[in-house]
Amino acid sequence: MIDAALALLLEAQNEDGGWSSFKGKRSNTESTSFALLALNALEGDPFDRQKTTGLKWLLQHQKDDGSWSFNDAAKQSSWTTPIAALALMSFRDQRQHALRAAKWILTQEGRKPGWVASLLVRLSVIKKMTELDPYLSGWSWTAGAFSWVEPTSYSLMALKKLKRSLVGTNCEERVRQGEMLIYDRMCEKGGWNYGNSRVLGEALWPYPDVTAVALIALQDRGTNKANQTSLRALDTLMRETPSGTALGWGILCLSLYKQDVDEWKKILVRNFEKTKFLGETKAVALSLLAFGNGASLFRV
Amino acid sequence: MMNRREFIKVSAVASLSSLVGGCRPMVRWDRDAYRKTAISQVAILEAKSYDASLEDIIRRGIHLFKLDLKGKRIILKPNLVEFDPKGVINTHPAVIEAAIGSFRSLGAREVVVAEGPGHRRDSEYLLTASGIYDVIKEHRVRYVDLNTDDVRLTKLRSSFTNLTEMYLPETLFNADLLVSMPKLKTHHWAGVTLSLKNMFGVVPGSVYGWPKNALHWAGIDGSILDINSSLPIPQFAIVDGIVGMEGNGPLQGQAKQSGVLVLGDDLVAVDAISARLMMIEPRKIEYLEIAGGFLGNISHDRIELVGERLERFQQNYRVMENFQELKVLTG
């Protein structure tokens, strides 16, 4: 499977050095970052040319303020910035560029309710709609929108990896707030979905990929009861959702929490045979990360 | 204390404040966004179950609209927002399969299935769990994840939000017909989710997030209107009402056997009839009422029904407590 997945990944690299979500599309920051992470996680440091051109694409697309847009067509700074920072940190000599990204991340904050919504929160209407604390500060998918679990988790991963270089900034406080937000959004029986545990009084169900991403972001709080509950939930979710994305993230997460992943790797191989993970760059890259030394690249 | 319906109205006013604060009446759509015709046709077709000869039924329905499909690329846009093994959230794969066969047999050059799920990013899971993966594999149909497709910045043809431009997937610009294939469902924020609301799923998550929260801030009703007024290609609708969803839709409502498909080339008219099938007054759905002013026909006397009679399939779909006022049909 590794050879087939690797071949898929290498074939999907665009002439400009980047990767798109699906072969033949425009290169984007998320796919290029996951592809580079996957290649850097392989034993023996192969594929120098592919990594060099991929890295060049990433560096060329970093904006002056340290951020990345999703791709050349969608030009605004985006949620992909912490993922690109993680990819840069998988190279030995790109920490300064990652640090620029981290500084941009610290300037970003999910939107909080305005005065109308604040009034309605006080009247407790919103609480009935979505039982969450709207004043906790995390990161949004796009500027001017609410904080959600996945972009907050990516930002936490990048900031935690770079925290020693961010002394004297508001990094520590932002990380603390981000962690509070993630815990606030946890589903009733553990795990996370996009970021609403209840809507109109009804409990919503968690997703395996987001659960794994959140747990990776919270790995330094591993003994926390919520982490342990969510780890158990992740096991169930991975059985119900054996996709490349879910299993790839799941294996990386379980590895970081020092759990046995051999059985999951077998399931990953079986499912790759069925769907080839639709050829989606991120899913293929995550599966390679799961088999290689990927967990170390996400250790904070 | 304000109830949820009132809250939604206040929120809508807040998000659409530019529309209520002006001193002069504004036309909120460009001339080329105006699509109303004198009369719109809507087909109500009986389909008792997903085991019925759906391809024959849908082909017969499409045929009623005399669409020129020869050599055309058709995009089928189902509702794949989420998946719940115990629920009826999604457009049934049998309906998608039947639509693929129908459009192909009527001369389409290519049929593509495309969706930008609003909550989950994991397309592989949604496709395999919902059964759509087996359909597209068997029929060798291309699937496009609209969330991560290439995008094009597009000038909006109406201004019901404060947005002037929106990113839309490139796949739309390279096709000839966009077929909205929603489930017949109630919706806890919007009242109903039908072919117009289903178009929220064409907006790319890579730009607007999961959920597409930037558009929620801009206003859900306004966004539905701005998206639908600005789609670059003609549209058609096939509503899966064989088993619909009532109550706390779009995710956690209950299944409702209705045995019907609704087809048409005027999405406003299709949604108005679909709402009436659920015994919901379309004029009380804010975005639908406004859409009836320029995007299509909402009045019963401007809609010619073909196929079955509306009354034969009309059923009382339960709505959330604070949407009870939608249940007063005014005809």
Image: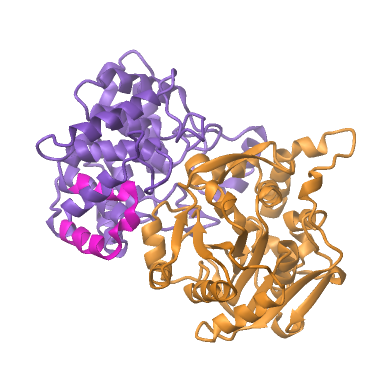
Chain colours: A purple, B orange
Stretch of the chain drawn in magenta: A265-290
Examine the rendering and report whether any part of residue B188 can be seen.
Answer: no
- Name the residue nearer the viewer: A229 or A299: A299
Examine the rendering and report whether any part of residue B25 can be seen.
Answer: yes
- Name the residue nearer the viewer: A287 or A155: A287
Please identify the quarter of the rendering in which residue A219 is found. top left
A286 within the magenta span:
yes
Q: Residue at the location (77% across, 67% down)?
A: B281
Residue B67 location (% of width, % of height): 69, 69
Answer with left or right where residue B37 lies relative to residue B277: right
Q: Residue at the location (74% across, 62% down)?
A: B268
Q: Main secondary structure of the magenta part?
A: helix
Please identify the quarter of the rendering in which residue B83 is found. bottom left
Q: Residue at the location (12% across, 56% down)?
A: A262
Q: Is residue A110 above or below residue B74?
A: above
Residue lying farthest right? B24
Residue lying farthest top? A168
Q: Is residue B11 above or below residue B197?
A: above
Residue A33 location (% of width, % of height): 32, 36
- Name the residue nearer the viewer: B312 or A11: A11
Q: Is residue A77 above or below residue B116?
A: above
The count of marks equals 0
Q: Quadrant of the C terminus of chain B?
A: bottom right
Answer with left or right where residue B267 lies relative to residue B187: right
A208 within the magenta span:
no
